Image: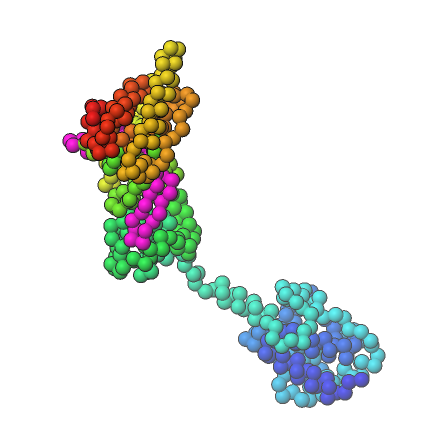
Amino acid sequence: MSSPDDVSLQLGQLEASVALQQCPEALEDLEVICRSKPQECGIATKEDPPAPAAILASPEEDTQGLKVSSSGKEVPGSLFRLSRGGEDVKHGVSGGAEQDLEEVEQEAEGEKREHGQVEPLLPHLAAWGLGAMPDMKPSSSRQEQCPVEAMEEASAKSSRPRQPALGDLLSLSDLECSLCLRLFLEPVTTPCGHTFCKECLERCLDHRPSCPLCKQSLSEYLKVGKYNPTVLLEEIISTTFPSQLAERKRMHQAEMAELSNLTKNVPIFVCTMAFPGILCPLHIFEPRYRLMIRRCQETGTKMFGMCIHEPGKRFADYGCMLEIQRVEFLADGRSLVSTVGQRRFRVLRRGHRDGYNTADIEYLEDEKVEGEELVELQHLQEATYQLAQRFCEQADAAFRQTVMQRGALPEKEEDAQASADGPAWCWWLISILPFDPSYQLRLFSTTSLKSRLSQLKHILTALLESRDFGRRHSDLNPGGGV
């Protein structure tokens, strides 16, 4: 049996817990008190007067509490009510009311001997509107947040001014590249802290290895050769301006589709003669051609045209498409590009784009022959190929070194007309013979395989018949004489 001092202490602790808004602890203390006073503690429900709802009221609402009537006095801040013989007698505690506390203790002690159980408190407290608390079970922890306090915090948060959304703080101009004045696409941030579109930065670095804004050197950055996108900025753009970003990407894809066309506005490298199936190594250092090579790789075609210079026309009327096989970037932005010739073409219209030449083109094909003409063509190929083999075997050391750079003589195809451009060994031979470029271009542009083989046979025969071939081969007349 608990002594009156124990009950008094428990009541004092209960009142202190309520004052400190430690609701789980207050509920635990209240449960202990009610269990020590069986049948004397009744529970108010929603049908009762609204005053009991102030049991766990905040300090500001403490004046609306229940009133104690055991001593005939009204005492604010009451915690529970006692019942005796069907009559409700309200009891409460307030600071300094010792007499009331003693009366409550005596009455509770007497009733405890007659009754055994107390009606559970928690379901009724939940019925008063406190059921939203996450855990109404008594807890020994003194650090759990009071439900009333949680509700007050929620109310305070709802009354705070709404935080502005990210879209309210940013405008489209805040996310524009300072070089192209368009929305960032694949934004890249330099070591100096400035951000540009990846393509815009690459084009600037083609001309000068420094930041376009602050002019800080980016030589080491360029040497790495890898530009990582600024992921956070990409996410901000996609979240804040999704429709504008979609439109920006659509425009970029349209540009890439235009650059991927291999008959319209084909990029033209004006340099040397190139031939189908023959390797053509290049050293790229001019900014315009750096851009051209990069675009060929980005579009996925990896193709561009090669033409020789022709006065008055910027470049010749005929050229060869080259396919990029490998690119090796140097620390200063230059590159070594390995290419191989593909198809011959004729220029229909010349153009210009971002510093380099372009052209509308049509591809060339050798004329096909049948019947006796085909048999004659096969014999002509066999005879010319044998002369080419003898020429390679009898060449001097200097010429053999040139041959080694081009690779060995390709194998002869069984069908001379298998390729639209004719046998590969034929182009290999034209590329190593000391012809004037204009004569090479004449052989290159012809669409008659028989005519091309006939001219090569005549030239090889003249070279092999010459006694001083090793000394005089560089003086070969483009017309075929020695």
State whether residue 135 is above or below residue 7. above
Near-viewer residue (80 or 467): 467
Quadrant location, the C terminus: top left
Secondary structure, magenta segment, majority class:
strand
Quadrant of residue 456 within the rendered picture: top left
Q: Is residue 477 above or below residue 326?
A: above
Q: 14 or 216: nearer the eye?
A: 216
Q: Which one is nearer the viewer's eye here, 131 or 69?
A: 131
Residue 347 shows up from this direction: no
The residue lying furthest to the left in this view is 312
Instruction: Give the vertical position of 132 relative to 228 (above or below).
Output: below
Residue 447 versus residue 106 in the image, above or below? above
Residue shown at 29% from the left, 58% from the top: 218
- Extent of the magenta region: 311-340
Q: Residue 23 in the image: x percent, y percent?
A: 63, 74
Residue 299 screen position, x and y as percent? 37, 39
- State which quadrant residue 170 falls in: bottom left
